[in-house]
Image (cartoon, rainbow, N blue to C red):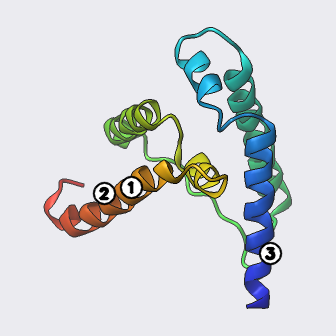
Amino acid sequence: MKSYLKYLFAGLFFGFALVKSEVISWFRIQEMFRFDAFHMYGIIGSAIIVAMISIQIIKKMGLKDSTGTPITIPPKDSSQITRYLAGGILFGIGWALTGACPGPLFTLAGAGYEIMIVPIASALLGTWAYGLLRPMLPH
């Protein structure tokens, strides 16, 4: 139980950051999809820059995870670009329809928006269906 506390605190901090940065606001998401404001693009762009810098630090310093295992990041297979595009488009459609991506869905549910249980349950059902159909799909 004690080992899970760090994940609980990380999740609480992540949810707090999402609420305070207004990333879970439907108004902000609507602004983004209408190209009316820079707010969400600034947050997403900042996250990309932080991730790029973090990955370079991990690679240069050979950092290890919490169990002592070296962190390895395999290169992306550029021949799978169609798969990445299809997944990105499906993700964007889901984001536009629900007004939230997976992280904010849980934050919104935790903030008392019970309706978010519907997209969370739908995502779980979709994941289960993919797992069931995966052997029959082209990969």
Residue carrying label 2: 126
Residue at the far bottom in the pictured view: 1
Residue drawn at x 61%, y 47% as measured from the top left: 104
At which x and y percent is residue 134?
23, 63
| Residue type pointed to by label 1 | Ala
> In 3D space, how far apart are the residues under numbered discs 3 and 1 (Cα atoms)?
25 Å
At which x and y percent is residue 9?
80, 68
Q: Nearer the viewer, residue 94 or 71?
A: 94
Residue 117 can be seen in this image: yes
Residue at the far left in the pictured view: 136
Q: Nearer the viewer, residue 132 or 62?
A: 132
Residue drawn at x 60%, y 16% as measured from the top left: 31
Residue 64 can be seen in this image: no
At which x and y percent is residue 83?
33, 42
At which x and y percent is residue 114?
52, 53
Label drawn at residue 123:
1
Label 3 packing within 10 angstroms: few (<14), some (14-19), many (20+): few
Say what secondary structure mark 1 lies in: helix
Residue carrying label 3: 6
Q: Quadrant of the C terminus?
A: bottom left
User: Residue 19 is drawn in which quadrant?
Assistant: top right
Indicate whether 109 appears above or below 89. below
Q: Quadrant of the N terminus?
A: bottom right
Q: Nearer the viewer, residue 1 or 137?
A: 1
User: Residue 58 is drawn in which quadrant?
Assistant: bottom right
